[in-house]
Image: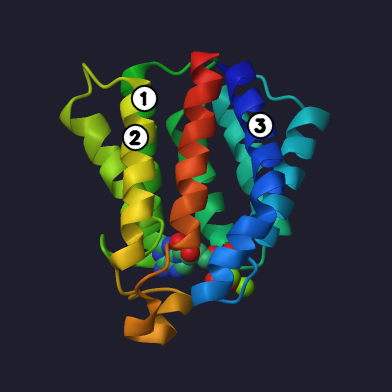
Amino acid sequence: TTETFATFIANYARRLADLQETLNTLDNNIGDGDHGTNMARGFKAAAEQLAAKPATDVGGACNTVGMALLGSVGGASGPLYATVFMRFATAWKGMTSVDATNFAAGIAAALEGLQTRGKADVGDKTMIDVWHPVNQTLQNVRETTTLQAIVETADTAALATKQRIAKKGRAAYLGERSAGHCDPGSISSAVLFEELVDATIG
Ligand code: ADP
Ligand code: MG
Ligand code: MG
């Protein structure tokens, strides 16, 4: 519901504030060390704007979040996560609650948006490595997918980026030296799914 979504954003913002240093350290290994700062700043703005102007439908809330991210995050992750929420906004426009079928359609649309914008393939050691298997899980076994399966898929996929060699984003400059470190955007995406599922279970 719209309320569940607002809870998810508030909780995710809080979680990112707690994880800020951890995500910065991960990004420091293979990038420029700002992923935690970018995410904490962006979702703090998103949570504040959503609280200041509560949306009347889930799509409207997603639009507010997307716009807040665009306005507050300069790094690669800002426009990418903004794309996710703008795609959700279109998929869930006018809905005061999102059922399993609509939820799966929203995730598929978000993945498509990420790939259109970022041009990364699966295995390139980006957040696509998490969004793609989560989408697969939802499309393959939609009827029986438990929300917990989404979390397990996302967490496993994020940790599996560790052995990959980066092909997109700043980490790609390191080539083979990017192996041995998890992709920070994949970790923040896995945490997003944890909080989304937690808020949905209630
Ligand atoms: P920046 O790299 O500009 O400093 P961040 O550190 O906030 O931005 O975000 C880095 C994350 O963005 C990476 O860990 C990766 O998951 C994601 N990313 C970077 N480039 C792409 C891309 N082309 N497609 C998908 N995700 C990407
Ligand atoms: Mg960075
Ligand atoms: Mg940066």
* Position in image of residue 181 (x %, y %): 42, 68
Q: Residue shown at 37%/83% (left/top)?
A: 177
Which one is in front in this view, the residue at disc 3 or the one at disc 2? 2
* Mark 3 lies on residue: 11
In this view of the protein, which residue sits in the foreground, 121 or 23? 23
For the point 73% across and 57% down, the residue is 72
| Amino acid type, residue under disc 1 in the picture | Gln
**Quadrant containing the N terminus in the rendered view:** top right
Where does the image place residue 111, in percent across and percent down from the top left? Answer: 35, 48
The numbered mark at residue 110 is none
Disc 3 vs disc 2: Cβ atoms closer than 8 Å?
Answer: no
How far is disc 3 from disc 2 in space, using C-alphas?
A: 19 Å
- Residue at image mark 1: 148
Which element is circle 2 on? helix
Amino acid at circle 2? Glu
Question: For the residue carrying disc 2, how many other residues have a C-alpha within 10 Å: few (<14), some (14-19), or many (20+)?
Answer: some
| Disc 3 element | helix
